[in-house]
Amino acid sequence: MNVPLVDLKAQYAPLKDEILSGISKVFDSMQLFLGENVQGLEKEFAQFCGAPCGIGVSDGTNALHIILRALDIGPGDEVITVSHSFMATTEAILLTGAQPVFVDINPDTYLMDVSQIEAKITPRTKAILPVHLYGQAVDMDPLLEIASRHGLRVVEDCAQAHGAEYKGHKVGSLGDAAGFSFYFSKNLGAYGEGGFITAKDPELATKIRKIRDHGSGVRYHHDIVGLNGRLDEIQAVVLRAKLPHLASWNEKRREHAVMYNSLLEGLPLTIPVELTDNHHVYHLYVIRVSNRDQLQAYLKEQGVFTGIHYPVPIHLQQSVATLGYKNGDLPVTERVANEILSLPMYAELTDGQIGFVVETIKKFIAQKETLIPA
Ligand SMILES: *Cc1c(COP(=O)(O)O)cnc(C)c1O
């Protein structure tokens, strides 16, 4: 049996006719950018998130970058975030000219350790950028309290958490603004590039809209310096066809996580922790083992494809060496990067496939009596 990490074809099959007929209409009309489908998606996805304003953008990296620009964050400013994320989170900060400042993560959830934020605040700090990694929300109440006490903006990175909830509220509705990615493998994925911004304040949303389209509200009149961050109609067709299914796909992911949890229980590895206040949407199902690389290689030999999200912490990447971080600065982040393994996870995964993944892990453990609990 072969079990991929994600299976895009299984999701496409039942939506094929709807998507192709929508794309055909776009081609007939030749309204290719920011047309009725983007406008429709902006309403529908903002509503899904419980956010007052929604803006479709070109991708998740630009989503975060545009938000920071709209908040006037730039050279001389600092933004507090995590190193345990996809590189884009930090890139979005660096592209504004501001400095990222990293806090470590919680060793159980792998999410921002909110108790470390306050010690990192300086007169230059402008914003906090929590990442709802793997599909689970950061502990937002204490984070929002710190932000409000220090007059800081809060920008959520929701790229892995479409539909996740914190205390009954959807992510994307918790901070000043939030960036989503519709990269193909995310819980809601386009068939090309796509992203989304939710915002609380309509004035901020208007500025975000302008920055997305070269700083222009009226064509060829440029009020502020912007960029090209537009979402195209074809991607909006795909996303609108998928959006009505997102909640049920997320439920399927949650059911798969429950099954993985029960089958993996008692084995010498760490399973994901879902906090009681959270509705985790399992973008990734991440276990921890000390001999991760060996396990990953064995699973691959047996036809089970896994991932590592992410093997090198951002603060140790060559591209940001000038920030001056070194090994040992973020001990939990560094340790976790060596031990995490993402098992196959997508809505269409079958019980048989999950059983096969777990049986294969058990076979590995039986062969390697040296497997040490993480
Ligand atoms: C995917 C991702 C992004 C970037 O999104 P793109 O659409 O690929 O630009 C940002 N942050 C996190 C946590 C992500 O997983």
Image (cartoon, rainbow, N blue to C red):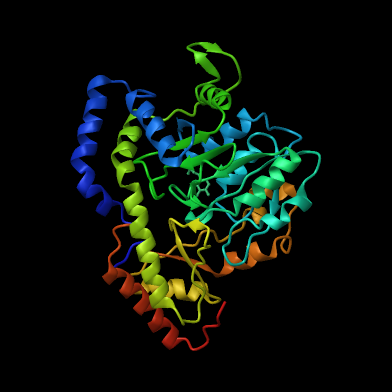
**Of 208 and 75, which appears nearest the observer?**
208
Taking 343 as reference, is 98 left or right? Answer: right
Question: Vertical placement of 266 versus 192: above or below?
Answer: below
Residue 98: give x, y in percent of width and height: 70, 37
**Of 237 and 299, which appears nearest the observer?**
237
Residue 348: give x, y in percent of width and height: 29, 58
Taking 134 as reference, is 93 left or right? Answer: right
Q: Looking at the image, which residue sits at the far right?
A: 123
Q: Quadrant of residue 92?
A: top right
Q: Quadrant of residue 299?
A: bottom left
Residue 127: give x, y in percent of width and height: 68, 40
Q: Is residue 362 in sight in this rendering?
A: yes
Q: Is residue 345 in sight in this rendering?
A: no
Q: Residue at x 68, y 46 (%)?
A: 145
**Of 222 and 316, which appears nearest the observer?**
222
Taking 110 as reference, is 153 left or right? Answer: right
Q: Quadrant of residue 312?
A: bottom right
Viewport quadrant of the N terminus: bottom left
**Of 337 and 279, which appears nearest the observer?**
279
Q: Looking at the image, which residue sits at the far front?
A: 168
Q: Residue at x 32, y 32 (%)?
A: 234
Residue 78: give x, y in percent of width and height: 73, 41
